[in-house]
Image: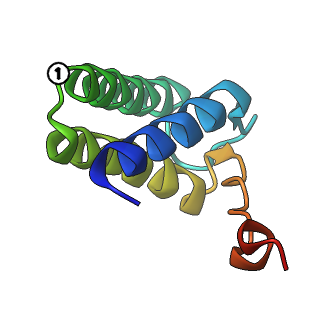
Amino acid sequence: MNMKELASKYVSVSEQVLKELQTNETPGSFSPQKVKEIIEYARAYLEDAKYYMQEGEFDVSLTSVAYCEGLLDALRLLGTVKFEWPKAPSLRAKKGK
């Protein structure tokens, strides 16, 4: 998979997660406003990734989407949001076995 395909894949997955993301009603000791603020940072990094992908700067796009995913994972690990990363298709399915 080349850089363009990787960037496209990760952007698509992050878009899907942000659409399906649910915030927890009781985010523990974290203020709901701060959780929303961090989600907006993740969205901004995703928009940066899409911009750089359109500009052909796939390395910068991948870096931006990695920041997005890192913020989302941190929120999930802290228990403030709920989501699942989509499962990658198995290599056997791709090879037709």
Is 48 positioned to the left or the right of 72 in the image? left
Q: How many marks?
A: 1
Report the amino acid beneath label 1: Glu
- With respect to residue 75, does 40 lie above or below? above
> Which residue carries the number 1 mark?
55
Which of the image's four quarters has the C terminus?
bottom right
Q: Judge by depth and name the residue closer to the eye, 16 or 35.
A: 16
Is 29 positioned to the left or the right of 1 in the image? right
User: What SS does tag 1 mark?
Assistant: loop
Q: Which residue lies at the image location 45% right of the left edge and 56% below the top edge?
A: 74
Q: Judge by depth and name the residue closer to the eye, 64 or 6.
A: 6
Which of the image's four quarters has the N terminus?
bottom left
- With respect to residue 51, does 17 lie above or below? below
Is 40 positioned to the left or the right of 31 in the image? left
Q: Which residue lies at the image location 55% right of the left edge and 29% below the top edge?
A: 32
Q: Which x, y percent locates residue 22?
A: 72, 33
